[in-house]
Image (tube, grey):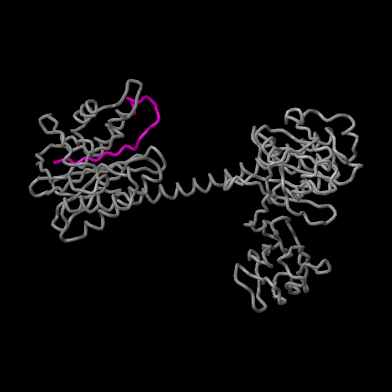
Amino acid sequence: MLSLIGTDGEHYYTFRLKPGRHVVGRKTECDISIPNNTVSRKHAELEIDPSGEKAFVSDLGSHNGTTVNNLRVTARTEVKPGDQVGFGSTEFRISSGDQPATPPQSTRKHQTQLADFDPEQSVFLDINEALKPLPQKATDNPELFPSLSEIARMLVLSEPREQMLERSLELVNRVIPADRLAILFTSEEDDEIYTAATLLPGGKEMGKFTLSRTIIDQILEEKSAILVGDPTVDPRYAEQQSIIMADLKSAMAAPLFDEGRVLGVLYCDTTNPLHRYNNDYLRLLATFGNIIASRLLNYELIEEREEKQIMDAEIKRAASIQRRLLKMDSPDIDGFSLHATLESSRSVGGDLYDFAPLSDNRLLFLVADVSGKGMGAALLMANILASFRILYDQDSFGLLKSVEKVSMQMFNYSDPGDFATLFVGILDPATGGMTYINAGHNPPMLARADGSVELLDASGTMIGAFNFNTWSEETTTFAPGDVLFVFSDGVTEAEGPDGQYGEERTQESLLRARGGAPAEITTAIRRDIEAFIQGASQSDDVTMLVVKKE
């Protein structure tokens, strides 16, 4: 069966839609009555076909209009499960039997005004005092335990928050007589108080709320419940059109308190002198408020879990994309062998490497390390990699010109403080020569066949840091047996019980392993790092690239 589920900003509604025609309007005799001033007396018509599976809406000449998915209806329009339907400023959704009955999120907040007057003849009760065991007299109420039991069941029920709040007020009203009940929240956006749910047992209009600022401050900051015994003695309430109505005899408010936090306020008042509230009623209100707060906290935990699941899925997808961006297979180059590996300290990271055969049979390779960690660094990494790959295919590719272009793009389109260190080289297999630029990167180590090690020091600053050029091209030549080791600072800065792995140990590890193939060299260095850190977690991305002359 189809349902119409929604809110007018104050109340939550669910209407079951049987086959036939249903008039929607403000008048109580309408099939679907919505007592809201923006809804015309006879506003629209919903038609459900005999199967109960198709629905159509028609506007009946309403003043404020009828909308479907935010588009105004001018003719008979089909509506399907999930469609949003608006009558005036009210917001509804068509739901089927197999859809969760989730109301549309209203953008309307009914603000509660705060006034600088203090309530007279009032009693503040600390929340710890208010939550003490109820006295025998209070427990004599036959509705108390069934109501507490039912409201406690809501801790495990799966239902929209708005519906839970409405039902909570109904259960409170079984035990505490009231003319008006409300649940008030503090807006995180503007620090104002607004009504999240209201209940008027007589079907009256809630009207405008004006609360004493003292009451709100005491409840929110001091975690106290308040009992106002007979506010009619203070003429300021009538003058202020306050929440304390002109003929009011008593009012109470208690914090929705859980895990040391005040999540909102539970309020009720009465005009009946026979129902004047006392400390026992205040303890009852505080008890109900505590249970409601526990359920609200549960909603927060569920939302956090769902957000975490979404974030985890997004990060997993980002990690997969990042892995695919990197070259998995090393290119075949006459007289040389190459290998690269990257291990991120998180699911995604800011290190990168790349190989690219150029049109003149030379080979370009690079290693870069973006500042920062996590998703932001990963986005910059992808941008740098994409920028270089666009330039590779140009016949006029030049090393210095390409570094300058990528650096300026990064400088112009990223935040201050975002930069990357970079080592990029072009190898000519025919001569064994290499031209390179070291843009603020850890000096790569060129282990010669005779056992000596040369450091390829920086020839300029990091890329993306400044809007001027500071790089120069440098050259070196490979001899048979020479090994070039390019790495990120995750290698030398790996932390162990004895401090950092460091450049000296990196050189020693490279010299011990240089007789093997490039993949064997990176594996040997990685194992030595793991032995050094002795099980400590990896604090930074570790990238290694090896070029060896046969």
Identified at 72% across, 63% down, the residue is 4
Identified at 33% across, 49% down, the residue is 414
In the image, is residue 279 above or below residue 86?
above
Q: Residue furthest top?
A: 498
In the picture provided, is 445 more to the left or to the right than 237? left
Identified at 7% across, 47% down, the residue is 431
Q: Is residue 83 visible?
A: yes
Q: In the figure, residue 536 lies in which quadrant?
A: top left
> Is residue 549 found inside the magenta-colored segment of the image?
yes
Q: In the figure, residue 432 lies in which quadrant?
A: top left
Q: Residue furthest bottom?
A: 75
Q: Is residue 48 visible?
A: no
For this rendering, which residue is in front, 92 or 118?
118
> Is residue 392 found inside the magenta-colored segment of the image?
no
Specify the quadrant that holds the C terminus.
Answer: top left
Q: Position of residue 182 (x, y in %)?
A: 75, 47
Q: In the figure, residue 62 lies in which quadrant?
A: bottom right
Q: Position of residue 252 (x, y in %)?
A: 79, 40
Q: Which residues are magenta?
A: 530-550
Identified at 77% across, 39% down, the residue is 288
In the image, is residue 373 above or below residue 222?
below
In the image, is residue 20 above or below residue 327?
below
For this rendering, which residue is in front, 435 or 401?
401
